[in-house]
Structure formats: C-alpha cells, structure tokens
Image (cartoon, helix red, strand yellow):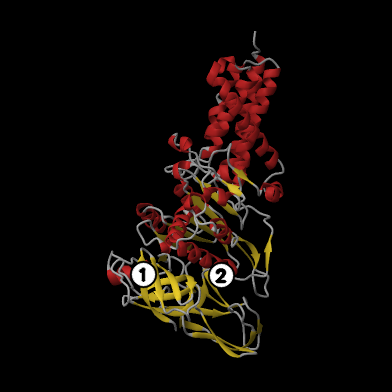
Amino acid sequence: MASGKIKKVAGPLVIADGMRDANMYDVVRVSDQRLIGEIIEMHGDQASIQVYEETSGLGPGAPVESTGLPLSVELGPGLIGSIYDGIQRPLTEILKMSGNSLQRGVEVPSLNREKSWEFVPSVKKGDELKAGDIIGTVEETKIVSQKIMVPPNIEGRVKDIKSGTFKLEDTVCILETPDGDKEITMLQKWPVRVGRPYKEKLPPSMPLITGQRVVDTFFPIAKGGVAAVPGPFGSGKTVIQHQLAKWSEADIVVYIGCGERGNEMTDVLNEFPELKDPKTGYSLMERTVLIANTSDMPVAAREASIYTGITIAEYFRDMGYSVALMADSTSRWAEALREMSGRLQEMPGEEGYPAYLGSRLAQFYERAGMVKTLGEDDRVGALSVIGAVSPPGGDISEPVSQATLRIVKVFWGLDAALAYKRHFPAINWLTSYSLYINNIGNWFEENVNEKWISNRQKLMTLLQEEAELDEIVKMVGMDALSKGDRLKMEAARSIREDFLHQNSFHDVDTYTPLEKQFYMMELVVAFYEKSAQALTEGASINDILKMDVRERIGRFKYTLPDDVESEYEKISNELLAQISEAVSRKED
C-alpha cells in the first residue's frame, strides 16, 4: 500500500508526496485522525486528494495512506430504512457513538455486521449459476424482500448452499468455478463510479405513474426515464420530490439530499417514518434509503453522495425492482465540482464551472433506464432519476440547467409566480415538456382510454390559446372578447383550477388514479365542446357561465375512487340538461 506525507492543504483538497504506487480514485486515510479521502489527480509521485471530512488543523508532514481500493459502497440486507451520509456512513450508528456532532475520522461499517438475517435459498446443490442469478432471499422489511445474487463476473456450479439465520459476512453458498471455489456471502461491495452491469437496456414503453395530474397527463416520465425539476428558491422543488417519493409507482425510493439546507433534510427525516405507504399501509421508510449530505457538511462529500445513491439504486434495480431516485439538488453537486476544480487550478469553463460539467452530469443520468438484468430468469428492472436543479435567481440559462436539459427528456419547469399563488404543483404548463409522450402515448390509449392523448391535446391547446388571449384581456378587458373567446378563457380557468391544481394535504386529492384523471379531462372537454355548440345555437354566454354544474365539475376531484364512475355519469347528465336549458332560453 502506498503511503506518503501531506505537502499542502487547501480546504478539502490535500496534496501529498510519495504516492507513486497509488492509483486514481483510490480511497486514502489522511493524518493520524484517519480522515477519508479519494485521489482525484496524479502528477508523478504527487497525489491530489479530495477529503470527505473537515480538514482544519491538518498540516504538512502528516501521514497519508492509500487503501488500494476505489470508493465503494456496501450492498446487502440492512440498506432499507437506513440514513447515510455522502460516503455511506450510517448516521444513526454514528449518533449512538458520538452524539449529535459528527466526529472526524469515525469508522463505522455501512451495514451492521452483528445483525442476523433469515436466508431462504432458491437454488440447490449441483445447479449451474451465472452472474446475477438469485441464490436466495432475505425478508429485509415487511415490504421488501432482498434477493441475494451471484456477484458479477462469477459463474459456476453450486457446491454447497445453506439455509437459516446468518450474519452478513457468513458464507451462504459455495460455487465451483474454473478459478477454484468461491464463497458467496450476503454482502457485496461495488465501486461507486462504475455502473453495475446488465444484459440489455430497453426502450421506454410505459409511464412511471405518480398520481400528480400535471405530470401523468401533461408531462409524463417513463419508467426508467430521467426528469429535471428546475426552479427558483421557494417554488416547491423539494415538495414535489417528496410527493413523487410518496406516491410514484416505485418499489424502492432512494432520496439523496445533496447540499440542500439542513432543515429541509430534517423535514424528510421526520416526515418519511411517519408517512403511511399508500400501497401497503406500512411506514414509507420500509422501502426507502436516505442519503443526507446537507450544505453544512464537507463540500467534497456532495460529489460522492450522488454516486453512492445511484449505485444503491442500481443494486435494487438488478433484483428486478422499479426504483425511483430523487437527487436534491444537482446544482449543489455542481458547485462542489466547481470548488474542487478551482482548487486544482483547472481551466474554468462557463461561470467558473469545470469544462467537464456536462460529461459528468451525463455519466450520472445515463445510469438510469429500464434494463434486462444479469441472470437467467430475464428479470426487468427500472431506475428512474428525478433531479432537482436550483439555478441562481431561477435563471435556467445558467450552465447546470442547460447541461441537464441537453441530457434529460422531461423538463418540469417550476414557476415562482404559480407557487406564490398557492398553485401546487407549480409546474408551468407553457414551458415544461416531455419527450417520452410519443413512446408511451400508446400505453395510455391501450391501458386507460383510447381518447387519452386526444383529450390531452385539447386541454394543452386551450391553455396555449388562453395565454395568447390573456395579453388582449390585459389591454382591453374581458368584455371586448367574442363569446367564443370568453368561453375559451373560462374553460382554460377550469383546467388550471379544477384539473392542474392539486391539494397535497387532502386525503383524496393528493393522489389521482389514471382512470379518475381521464374522467376529469372528459368533463372539462365536454363542458367546453357542449358549450361552444350551444353558443352556435344561440345560447347566452352569461347563462352558460352561470351553470351550477360548473361547481360540480370543480368538486369532482374530491370524489372517492369507488364513486368516480357514478359521479361522472351524474355530472355528465346534469351538464347536458343545463346546456339544453341555456339553449332553450336563447338570446333575444
């Protein structure tokens, strides 16, 4: 193992001499306090090390020792429900050891070595196994059954398989391989900067259903897709990510608090254990892994936290689960890159960010996807990534937002003006987009209703026409509009207030199933089309706008799921009756 001495300390950057035998991205221990660091640059025998802990008090001459291994995460039973920092140190265990203050150099294994797990084998002696095959399962929580897999790059015949209660490092299976017998435990290690292997990446073909109407109907994300949520301070990025973590159709949620304010992360840590998972009735933490790396923690660890999170997510994807990863926020991660790049005296790119910002972002987002996993049973796993971006002043022309938009296919543009009007989710329907709609539109038509895409298009058209008419209204007032245009403005208002606006604190309205979303669209479209027809038959615009049924359409979103169909029928019939009445009272 290479060892050297500190030559220079500049914040989280430490330069050490005598490291010729070390390799790039080796994990090193710095000084007698054994602070964790990682080699990010080599010049001859001089290594530049980013230290993931506070470096105050370090000085030249202190020892540096390489472990000879890259930064890796531990994967196995015990991940679910854990709260880690950016380099997978378990914060709850550290709290027991050192209290509320995170001590430097503290060494705690990421997964508990003393806890025993019930291992149920799914193979037998003599079976031929390939990399990625499942050898058994462990009931990790009431919701998640963790599948113990043959590590990548190993294949052979089962020589011995055990059943019963074991600790993580106990051997549960022995494989005869061409290179000799290999002992398999329930614990795997994987370098965070290397994507876990799979057989084949599949094209996006189905949506990740979130229950948020503006997302599912207007700007859907595919299972295995990537989305960016940029928005200024206070526009609700974190709240939207919380909603998606709670309600999206994912088996596992990995939530990375990367450089955001500590009190926001505290809200997550307090809220998630209290929340009931709507699908199972158990705590949401029973299927969640949290990585907390707040803005007051060492800046270098932000960079690691993103890779730590996505490696854990890939591990569950390999079991065949659908995983949703929330990164809040990639802007803080990019700021950490900028700071380290500046200390390394690299040539700065736009706004001081390193020239490789775009490629690093791409490396992260490209690890998402729906894949056929390794193994003989043709499992399919999906990893969907939703990254928040915090552009200074809400200006998305800055480098991090622009580099992100070149990579992702869904853009949910948050609008501070909507947030201040208490419109949730504050996603601006005029600037946002989803490039998955062509791939997954057929899924909606086959699985929900064949009119889904045409209804969506009608609503989008009305909102766009409202934006154009709004300029005229501001200049000359609503009364100057024609009857048809006034009806368009009212229909668009109904879309905004009755369909797009959602109450995240309301038991029914916080999550809307796709069938109910379709009926809501149908009612708004029916109101507009029937009213437009009534106007051509001589009905008064004032009579149409005063119809009682409009209030019922607005309240439809609070209808319980079991009553949706019958309530839809009642409102549809009432709408037809009141339209007929308006036509019968024709304008003089």
Label 2 – label 1 distance at C-alpha? 30 Å
Residue 124 % position (x, y) = 62, 85
Residue nearer the viewer, 262 or 133? 262
Q: Residue at x 62, y 50 (%)?
A: 409
Vertical side of 391 occupied by 383: above or below? below
Vertical side of 163 occupied by 245: above or below? above
Q: Which corner quadrant holds the C terminus? A: top right
Q: Does the rendering let one see residue 546?
A: no
Residue 269 % position (x, y) = 38, 58
Q: Residue furthest top?
A: 588
Q: To which quarter of the image does residue 126 belong?
A: bottom right
Residue nearer the viewer, 69 or 346? 346
Residue nearer the viewer, 536 or 20? 20
Amino acid type at image mark 1: Lys
Q: Residue at x 46, y 43 (%)?
A: 232
Q: Considering only order in the chain, which callout, 1 or 2, is on the residue closer to the N terminus?
A: 1
In this rendering, position of residue 400 left or right of residue 275: right
The kind of secondary structure element at disc 1 is strand
Q: Residue at x 56, y 56 (%)?
A: 358
Which residue in the protein does label 2 denote?
A: 194
Which residue in the protein does label 1 denote?
A: 8
Q: Which corner quadrant holds the N terminus? A: bottom left
Residue 261 % position (x, y) = 37, 52
Residue nearer the viewer, 267 or 339? 339
Q: Residue at x 44, y 70 (%)?
A: 48
Amino acid type at image mark 2: Val
Vertical side of 297 occupied by 415: above or below? above
Residue 123 % position (x, y) = 61, 82
